[in-house]
C-alpha cells in the first residue's frame, strides 16, 4: 500500500525525501485557497514565486502580479491575497504571478517532487479522489508561518489523511496528529481555530470573511498541479 505523510513546516522538509512522491502544498489561510478560487474563476495559469523581487520583475514585464506579506498587499503591487479579489472576470484566461509569505515559498521548496499539487478545503474531495487513483506516496506539506507550525494547514492535512484512510497508509505521529485534529474539529472549524495565531492575525486585519470562505469544503471541483513551472488546472 502506498503511504501518506504530513510535514508540518517547510523548515522540516529536508527530513522527507521527495523523489517519486506527490507533494500537496497547503496554505489554507490563504495562498492555496486564493489560487483555487482564481482557477475556479477562469485564471489560465499561476506562476508562484518565492520573493517580492521576482514578482516585481514579472510585473515590470507586464504580468498581472499579486504579492502579500504579513497578511497585507505588499508595497508596489495592486493585488494581495484575498480570495474575493480573484472573483474578477477580467482575470479570465490570464496568467498571474503570485508571491506570499509562506505558501509560494513552500511550493518553491517542493521542486524535487515528482508532482506538486495545490490543496485547499475548497477542492478537498477532488484532491482525495485524484490521490486515491495515483499509486504514489504522498507528502502533505503545510506552509505554516515563517517556519512555525500552524493549526489550519495541519487540519487540512488531517482531512486528507482521514479521507484516504484504507487507501494510503499512514504511520508517522504528524499524520496521526493531523488526522485526530481534523476529526475533532471538522464540525466547527471556525470555532476550533479562533484562538490560533493566523486566525487572530487575519481577524485583526478585518479578514474574518476570508477565513470563513477558506474553510468552506468542496466549493470547487478542480485539481491544480504544477506543470513546467506553472500552476494549471489538470481536471
Ligand atoms: O503566508 C501565506 O502564504 C499567506 O497565505 C498568508 S496570508 O493569509 O495572506 O496572510
Image (cartoon, rainbow, N blue to C red):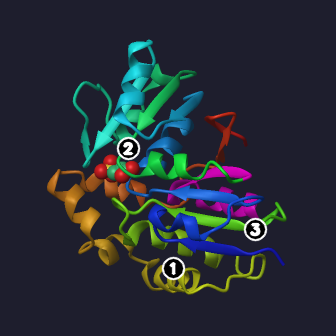
What's drawn in magenta, residue-wise?
114-131
State the separation of the CA atoms marked 2 and 1.
Answer: 24 Å
Whether residue 33 appears in this view of the structure is no
Q: Nearer the viewer, residue 165 or 213?
A: 165
Q: Say few, some or many: other residues with alpha carbon within 10 Å of mark 1 (under 14 / 14 to 19 / 20 or more).
A: many
Figure quadrant of residue 69? top left
Is residue 129 in the magenta section? yes
State the separation of the CA atoms marked 3 and 1.
Answer: 17 Å
The quadrant in which the N terminus is found is bottom right
Whether residue 204 appears in this view of the structure is yes
On residue 100, which mark appears?
2
Say whether residue 30 is left or right of residue 232: left
x%, y% of residue 57? Answer: 41, 21
On residue 10, which mark appears?
none
Along the polypeptide, which appears first: circle 2 or circle 3? Answer: 2
x%, y% of residue 79? Answer: 32, 30
The quadrant in which the C terminus is found is top right
What secondary structure prevails in the magenta region? Answer: helix
Number of marks in picture: 3
Along the polypeptide, which appears first: circle 2 or circle 1? Answer: 2
User: Tag 1's secondary structure?
Assistant: helix
Q: Which residue is mark 3?
A: 137
Which residue is drawn at the image coordinates 51% and 60% (left, top)?
121
Q: Nearer the viewer, residue 11 or 196?
A: 11
Residue reaching furthest to the left: 204
x%, y% of residue 180? Answer: 51, 86
Amino acid at each position: 500500500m502506498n503511504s501518506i505523510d504530513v510535514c508540518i513546516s517547510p523548515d522540516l522538509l529536508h527530513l522527507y525525501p521527495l523523489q517519486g512522491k506527490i507533494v500537496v502544498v497547503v496554505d489554507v489561510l490563504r495562498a492555496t485557497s486564493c489560487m483555487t478560487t482564481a482557477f475556479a474563476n477562469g485564471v489560465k495559469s499561476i506562476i508562484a514565486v518565492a520573493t517580492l523581487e521576482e514578482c516585481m520583475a514579472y510585473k515590470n514585464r507586464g504580468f498581472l502580479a499579486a504579492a502579500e506579506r504579513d497578511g497585507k498587499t505588499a508595497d508596489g503591487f495592486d493585488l494581495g491575497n484575498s480570495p474575493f479579489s480573484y472573483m474578477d472576470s477580467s482575470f479570465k484566461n490570464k496568467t498571474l504571478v503570485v508571491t506570499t509569505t509562506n505558501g509560494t515559498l513552500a511550493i518553491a521548496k517542493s521542486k524535487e517532487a515528482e508532482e506538486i499539487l495545490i490543496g485547499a478545503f475548497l477542492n478537498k474531495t477532488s484532491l482525495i479522489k485524484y490521490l486515491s487513483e495515483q499509486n504514489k506516496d504522498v507528502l502533505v506539506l503545510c506552509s505554516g508561518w515563517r517556519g512555525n507550525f500552524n493549526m489550519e494547514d495541519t487540519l487540512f492535512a488531517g482531512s486528507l489523511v482521514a479521507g484516504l484512510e484504507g487507501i494510503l497508509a499512514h504511520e508517522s505521529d504528524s499524520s496521526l496528529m493531523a488526522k485526530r485534529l481534523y476529526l475533532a474539529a471538522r464540525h466547527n472549524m471556525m470555532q476550533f481555530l479562533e484562538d490560533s495565531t493566523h486566525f487572530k492575525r487575519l481577524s485583526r486585519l478585518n479578514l474574518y470573511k476570508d477565513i470563513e470562505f477558506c474553510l468552506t469544503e468542496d466549493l470547487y471541483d478542480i485539481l491544480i498541479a504544477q506543470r513546467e513551472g506553472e500552476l494549471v488546472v489538470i481536471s
